[in-house]
Amino acid sequence: MNIIKNPELKGIIGLILVILVIGGLFALSTGRLEQWFPGPRITDKIVFVSGRAGANEIYTMNPDGSDQKQLTKGAKVASAPVISPLGNHIAFVVASGGVSQIFSVNGAGESLERLTTASGAKSVPGYSPDGNKFAFIASGRTFVSDINGENISTVLPTRGEIRASMSSMLERGTVPAYSNYAWNIDSNSLIGVTRDQAGSDMLVHLPKLDGHAETLIGAMKAPGGGQMLVYVGTCGGQPSPMMTIPSGQHARITGIGRAKDKPVFAISVEAGNAGALLTFDASTEKLTPVIATPKLIFGKPAVSPDGSSLVVPIKSENKKIPNCILKLDLGSRRMQPLVNGDFESASYSPKGDAILAQTVGEKRDIVSIDPSSGEVKQLTSDGNSFDAIWSPVSEK
């Protein structure tokens, strides 16, 4: 039966259908279909883990702590929630029977999907800034896949690192194991943390996901014996001393932070009872030491969205300086304690107008800190809330 008799109307409808088909095929081929139809999203919220109901589940709340809601049920969340740039996927680690895997849910806390299948402990899940890739660490390797876990490939250690380890006569078969990484803003490069044969951490830069890894920070023999941590000012440049590693100790990279809108990273390092803080500009491949000092240990740093400042929790070994969150202006190098107390897991809001942090101790709660005044607002009070992250902001 010919329902539509008007030839002009038939032509218009046919043209619309053709456009829709072509648009759908284009969206599928370019990976933009999800951007057009993202499904349920979480925006303008804080996402966190809490065990207040007896088991760890994912919750959401407003930036002022109001409207706290449980998002998942029976997800058995272990830690490390991360949210996609569109706010329509939340990935997290699930541990069961000594085995961990990474799962995700949509913005409504539904459609539980398993993203990993291999054996071995999983950690550091993370969506690329463009939302088209997903990365995680398993058994010492950094993997990158599609956001649904398909088309997986190993990016660290690189093929060159694996070949070098296999061809070494002294350390035959010792493949570098990676413990941490951070995406660059271009979604096609990252920095990663591995460990050398002597047991100290190394920081490497991977300018392309299928490229060669450049060492940024590493340990080497110091004049007169012992070990010294060195940095390379520009990839391929000459090593420069940064700090001495005490005898019997090793250097540890204790945290990496990245600016949301700039290719600027901050890296904290610990060696014995001394700490150091550095920045790395991925656009110029320049590593800059900010501070290296004894008796101070730096936690995971957080960089403001525009890359102009950072905050970092510090612990004082001699107690001359109280434990606090330190704020540092990267332009003037002016630093000041923002708020005293024991905190960890600091992060800037997407607009840079607030800082999330977590209290340290027997009870864990989430606080918000004003980056200008240092005023603290407690957002949770159950003593079992942690791993808070900011969701994307809505387009208003």
Image (tube, rainbow, N blue to C red):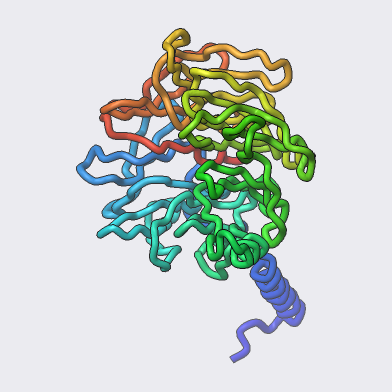
The outermost residue toward the front is 224
Q: State the residue at coordinates (56%, 64%).
A: 172
The answer to whether residue 84 is seen in the rendering is: yes
Q: Is residue 35 above or below residue 65?
A: below
Q: Is residue 24 above or below residue 372?
A: below
Q: Is residue 186 left or right of residue 315?
A: right
Question: Residue 32 in the image: x percent, y percent?
Answer: 65, 61
Give the position of the N terminus as an image quadrant: bottom right
Viewer-closest of 253 and 9: 253
Question: Residue 149 in the image: x percent, y percent?
Answer: 50, 65
Give the position of the C terminus as an image quadrant: top right
User: Which image quadrant is residue 238 in?
Assistant: top right
Q: Is residue 346 above or below residue 206?
A: above
User: Which image quadrant is residue 279 in?
Assistant: top right
Question: Residue 8 in the image: x percent, y percent?
Answer: 76, 77
Viewer-closest of 256 and 275: 275
Question: Residue 392 in the image: x percent, y percent?
Answer: 55, 41
Viewer-closest of 286 and 356: 286
The answer to whether residue 9 is seen in the rendering is: no
Q: State the residue at coordinates (65%, 28%).
A: 242
Q: Is residue 190 above or below residue 248?
A: below
Q: State the residue at coordinates (39%, 35%).
A: 61
Q: Is residue 184 left or right of residue 137?
A: right
User: Which image quadrant is residue 163 in?
Assistant: bottom right
